[in-house]
Amino acid sequence: MSLIMVAIFGLLLFLSFPVAHSLVIGSTLGIMWGGNLPLFAVIQQMFAPTQSFPLIAIPFFVMSGELMMSGKLGRHMIDFATDLVGRFRGGHAQVSVLGSTLFGGVSGSAVADATALGSVLVPWQKSLGYPAGFCGATIAAASTIDILIPPSIPLILYSLVSDASIGALFFAGIVPGLMLAIGFMAVCNISARLRGFPYDKHPIAWGQMAMRGLYAMPALMLPVIVLFSLRFGLATPTEISTIAVTYSIIISAVLYRDMSWERIKRSIFFAGTATGVVMLLIMASMVAGWILTLDQIPEQFIAWAQGNFNSKTGILLLMNLIMLVAGMFIDLPAAILLLGPLFVPLAQAYGIDLVQLGVMMVVNLAIGLYSPPVGTTLFIGSMLAKASIGETVKELLPFYAVGLTVLALIAYVPAFTLHP
């Protein structure tokens, strides 16, 4: 069954079918042609994961982020980030990095971050004299920081397949996210010095910076509320997601006075659409995972790995290489749901912490988001910058170096993913 399923899945992907549809068709045909199982078993396996209570957090976190990013608050955060770093060498490009880090505590989605921030920042950076390819590369790489700073949708998905604590994953993603932010900002600074990019030479307006900081503070407080609630057990992740929506509505309605029924309806629609895409992936992946389990593929994979790799170092290298390649061809949520069931038992067999594995997987697959041939944020960044994919990839080379360096540190220095 598994061989038929994988062959059909690969063929459909090659023909540009959506990943979820390819999985459902491949799994169904695999059962029909390779197994003696009734077809209603596919429906049962698809329906079962939808009854997971923690998954309710996904639409609420998405809605919270959309409510905040679509109003005045998003503009205030960009202005605040500009005040903080705009006067440094490469500071206008660093706004993309710092903005993504700040928005990471709001949206939890790299694609939403790249679209929302990039549509504002990329044309502005180009008008200042930055090369189009560099503008596209910066937003393509920087937007992936969003999925490490809590709340993170990919980490919630990983929790689904690994049973690792969502709270522990959220805490563990903070340091790697900040490491990427520092590294990307260093790339912007060094590139600006070597290539003579423009920067703001006006003196710092401290009063204006303080005022914009106050305006942006409500959004900056959201990840603090999330982590504080998780750390002290005040609420579950699902409960926190509903609190985040309520908080976003109150802040926008009372403080910024820009809330409207139209924005609420638009946010609900956006959250429902985004969640529907993710849920279809979850349902399809669970059927595929069930077939792999029936054919004992995870056990065979562990036996093969143990027979060929004698150390944890080698296993970590193997998993990273597989994830890097998979991330270049499969979108991040689908890759987590497909690889998680294979790597979790392997990690347990070698004594690798599952929270460390989760953060490593997200960082690894995040690199795939800005890598050809199907990198989502790569295409978004190139489109917004009106640059060719080749131009953007060329400018991405130092960002790849930073991403791989952080990945190596996460994989081989567990202290970087410490969690409570």
Image: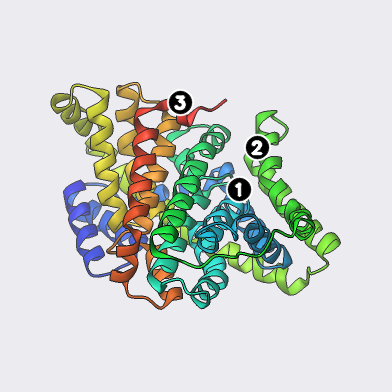
Q: Is residue 106 above or below residue 292?
A: below
**How far apart in space, not on screen, are marks 3 and 2 (Cα)?**
19 Å
Q: Secondary structure at mark 1?
A: helix
Rendered image quadrant of residue 9: bottom left
**How far apart in space, not on screen, are marks 1 and 3 (Cα)?**
28 Å
Q: How many marks?
A: 3
Q: Position of residue 246 (x, y in %)?
A: 76, 53
From the image, tell me which residue sits under label 2.
Answer: 227
From the image, tell me which residue sits under label 3.
Answer: 415
Q: Amino acid at mark 2?
A: Leu
Lower sequence index among marks 1 and 3: 1
Residue 1 visible in the snapshot: no
Q: Amino acid at mark 3?
A: Ala
At 83% from the left and 67% from the top, the residue drawn is 257
- Quadrant, the C terminus: top right
From the image, tell me which residue sits under label 1.
Answer: 57
**Crowd band around label 1 with a 10 angstrom C-alpha radius: few (<14), some (14–19), many (20+):** many
Residue 127 visible in the snapshot: yes
Q: Are marks 2 and 1 in contact (CB under 8 Å)?
A: no
